[in-house]
Image (cartoon, grey):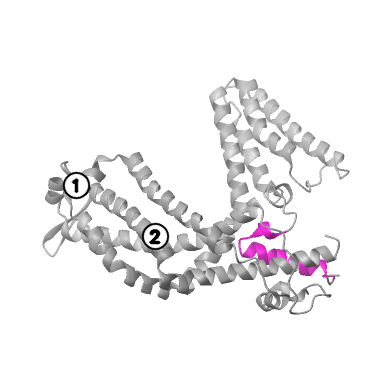
Amino acid sequence: MAAVAPDDTLRDVERWFRSRGIPHFIEDYSATRDVFTRALPSLTLVLVLELLGALNFTWPWWANVGTAAASLAALLGLWAVVNVARKRPALARPDRVGRTELAFFVLLVPAIDVVAGGQRLTALNTLLGNLALLGLIYLATSYALLPITRWAAGRLWRQLGDVLGLLVRALPLLLLFVTFLFLTAEVWQMAVSLDGARLALTMILFVVVGIVFVVARIPKEVGILARFQSWSDVASLVDGTPASALRPPAEASPSATPSETPRLGRRQWGNVGLVVLFTQGLQILFVSAMIGAFFIGFGLLTVTAETTMLWSGVEPDLLVEWDLWDRPVVLTAELLKVAGFLTAFSGFYFTVYVLTDATYRKEFLDEVLLELRQAFAVRAVYLASRQGRGG
């Protein structure tokens, strides 16, 4: 029988999961309890602001006051009814935000727009905006995007010197090829011919293909991390984490093989994938930004307004112009378009390089995978402890 762990120790482990950006490793993790309920103050504020925006100041003052009062009464009435149905004080803060509350948040103001003012387009925009807001809150909170970003940024800062060393190894061949493209008139004509939307879509295409390349490798890299040969392997990995206060099953000897840890569900796989994706993505974003800065600086020093017009075939759109050592230096919209296009292409190239280069894998990816293996070990002990307490 597994050792009984105090509730506060299990909560410490769950906080540890959240700080690592993997909240879906928490057993019985619920969107209504753990995501939207925590976002209730923000949702309430947004709803109040929307109610104020739904007022029509061409109406008499008493009509606006009546509409606001009726809306507020409906909000408080639903709040009270839900609480009473759950046998809680009528005006207490809800212990969870479920489908009823979310539907009310999404539909209340659009319904007021249609019934009170006949503003169907406004109602549709509000409805879509509310749905988009809920989706954003769910993704950002449920998958702990802020903790993931903070954790990945901390790793990037600690490894900045190593990342620069990798850049020095990868950059010469990349710049040799891409600089040749930068000095090619056809590239300027192609980039300049794209308007803002099409250029953005072209750059996004490189990003999406790079993400697909990274995601396609995640199952292969992560698949073996959740398998352990013995509980002693698990114990060595959880040392220094809150799970070290928990114990593996008492009847298992240190060399015994852990029982099958429940397989990852779809959301848990997505959570692990986001951790790997964000970690690699911040490094690639940092390197891509440096490459983009290089192209802009190189273009400022070498490409004049006359050269821009010759290569692009259009009158350059001058953004900034100044003299440097008695020579005009111009920053043009055309230069920014070309630099942006080649930066996106270079970022894609660098993505492929870092995931296939053996040195990079040893210095960076293996370290990320080791930290994920520790998280799987913590999860194994955490689940064993919960099962020992009756789940």
- Is the residue 134 above or below the residue 252 in the image? above
Q: Which mark is residue 352?
A: 2
**Direction from residue 374 to residue 200 in the image, left or right:** left
Q: Secondary structure at mark 2?
A: helix
**Image location of residue 196, percent across then percent down:** 33, 41
User: Given the current orientation, which residue lies at the most extreme right position?
Assistant: 87
Query: Which span of residues is magenta-colored?
Result: 4-26
Quadrant housing the C terminus: bottom right
User: Magenta part mainly helix, strand or loop?
Assistant: helix
Front tag of 2 and 1: 2
Amino acid at pointer 2:
Val
Locate residue 31 relative to residue 192 in the image: left or right. Answer: right
Q: Residue at x 57, y 71 (%)?
A: 370
**Image coords of residue 290 (percent x, y):** 34, 63
Instruction: Kindly check if marks 2 and 1 are in contact, taking CB atoms under 8 A apart as contact.
Output: no
* Residue 19 belongs to magenta span: yes
- In which quadrant is the N terminus drawn? bottom right
* Mark 1 residue type: Glu
Please give the label number shown on residue 340.
Answer: none
Q: CA distance from mark 2 to mark 1?
A: 25 Å
Q: Which residue is mark 1?
A: 186
Magenta stretch contains residue 47: no
